Image (spheres, rainbow, N blue to C red):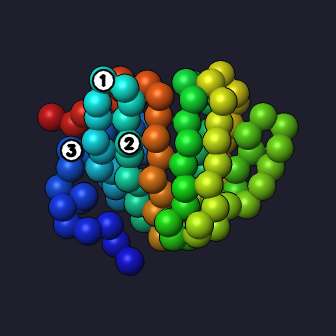
């Protein structure tokens, strides 16, 4: 099920992937950033690190490597990535996730 229209109308963010691969909608406060991601195509998220992140899979599947541990997350599964921990993922088309970042400026809002 797609995210509701009111969520889809939230501002998007600049991510280093084309709009035909991933769609975004976010809510930002001084305390953090909540991002709603919809992956339209299979994609590989290269290994990277940043501030703490918590997320949950709403639909689809992600194979995460967080630090030295690899696991598959499916709907209802949550994950936590501690600040500075290298992580990457293989994400299947149709996957929807909600990610919460401790860094409010993690991504720039689209104009």
Query: Foreground residue, 41 or 97?
Result: 97
Q: Please tell me which residue is depicted at 59% across the width and 66% down the height of the picture.
A: 76
Q: Secondary structure at mark 2?
A: strand
| Horizontal side of residue 77 vs 102, given as left or right | right
Q: Which disc number belongs to residue 30?
A: 1
Location of mark 3 (residue) = 11
How many angstroms separate mark 2 from mark 3 (CA)?
11 Å
Q: Is residue 81 visible?
A: yes
x and y, in percent, of residue 62 in the image:
63, 59
> On the rendered image, what quadrant is the N terminus found in?
bottom left
Q: Please tell me which residue is depicted at 70% across the width and 27% down the height of the picture.
A: 85
Location of mark 2 (residue) = 34
Q: Earlier in the sequence, mark 3 or mark 1?
A: 3
How many angstroms separate mark 1 from mark 2 (CA)?
11 Å
Mark 2 burial class by Cα count in 10 Å: few <14, some 14-19, many 20+: many
x and y, in percent, of residue 35 in the image:
38, 46
């Amino acid at each position: 099920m797609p995210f509701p229209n009111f969520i889809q109308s939230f501002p998007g963010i600049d991510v280093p992937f084309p709009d035909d691969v991933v769609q975004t909608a976010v809510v930002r406060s001084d305390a953090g950033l909540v991002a709603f991601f919809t992956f339209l195509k299979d994609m590989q998220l290269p290994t990277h690190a940043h501030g703490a992140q918590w997320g949950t899979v709403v639909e689809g599947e992600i194979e995460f490597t967080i630090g030295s541990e690899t696991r598959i997350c499916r709907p209802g599964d949550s994950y936590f990535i501690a600040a500075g921990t290298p992580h990457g993922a293989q994400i299947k088309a149709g996957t929807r996730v909600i990610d919460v970042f401790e860094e409010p400026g993690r991504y720039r809002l689209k104009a």
